[in-house]
Image (tube, helix red, strand yellow):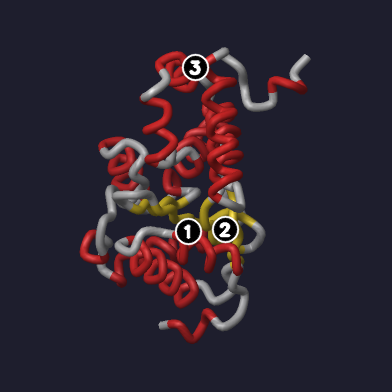
Amino acid sequence: MHENMSMKKDQRIDAYIAKSADFAKPILEHFRALVHKACPEVEETMKWGFPHFDYKGQMMCSTAAFKQHTAVNFWKAPLMKSGEKLVEKAKTEEAMGHLGKITSLKDLPKDSVLTKYIKEAMKLNDEGVKLSPAKRQSSAAKASLVVPDYFMKDLSKNKKALKTFEEFSPSHKREYVSWVTEAKTDATRDKRMADAMSWMSEGRIRNWKYAK
């Protein structure tokens, strides 16, 4: 399954997987390998702090790991043949992604089903199908705004910051989450987390210094 992965690997994803919890590593590797097998022309990248798989210059799918679960999302899920089921799954398991809460390989659909999803997503990109602005915003909110456990834990200790975060628009939430998760060292992440809690407790957006 890994023969297609010799090329076009993003080392940032290698590092992301290496730093993930032990239970998550085989899940991330398995999904990554399946994407490459189904879509040899896939382009790997990191967006919003976690692995994305693009095709034909458009986002296709993504995956993310947390302390107790992993998530998988398909950017154009609302337009896929299986879209209704995937979107409903995401709604019923909030912030768990289009495949629900994944804690082990057995929680993933069969390889044949996953491959079907990937092929559906590829076809939409092949045809240049675009999400409507409303669906794009909804998909972005679901696909990109998966808040890490440690982030929510810190928020839970700061009522003012939590209230601000909950009232933010998806884009403002994403700015903070991306800024913290993209830190290259634990020390930098901790510093950013502390700043984020301080600023949000004052009701400030991430880029408040530049806001007019």
Q: Type of residue at label 2?
A: Asn
Q: Between tags 1 and 3, which lies in front?
A: 3
Q: Residue at x 54, y 30 (%)?
A: 194
Q: CA distance from mark 2 to mark 1?
A: 7 Å
Q: Can the viewer see residue 85? A: yes
Give whichever of discs 2 and 3 has the lower sequence position: 2
Question: Residue 185 versus residue 206: which sits nearer the camera?
Answer: 185
The amino acid type, in three-letter code, at marker 1 is Ala
Which callout, 2 or 3, points to the residue nearer the camera?
3
Q: Could you say where residue 29 lies in the image, as x and y percent from the top left? A: 41, 70
Residue at position x 42%, y 20% in the image: 158
In this view, the residue in front, 192 or 88, is 192
In which quadrant of the rendered image does the C terminus lie? top right
Task: Kindly identify which residue carries mark 2.
Answer: 125
What residue do we see at 45% from left, 74% from top?
A: 38
Residue situated in front as seen by the camera: 183 or 25: 183
Of callouts 1 and 3, the N-terminal one: 1
Q: Is residue 183 left or right of residue 139?
A: right
- Note whether 184 is above or below 88 in the view shown: below
Quarter of the rendering occupied by the N terminus: bottom left
Badge 1: few (under 14), some or many (20 or more) residues near its Cα, within 10 Å? many
User: Which residue is label 1 attached to?
Assistant: 121
Name the residue tied to disc 3: 164
Q: CB under 8 Å between callouts 2 and 3?
A: no
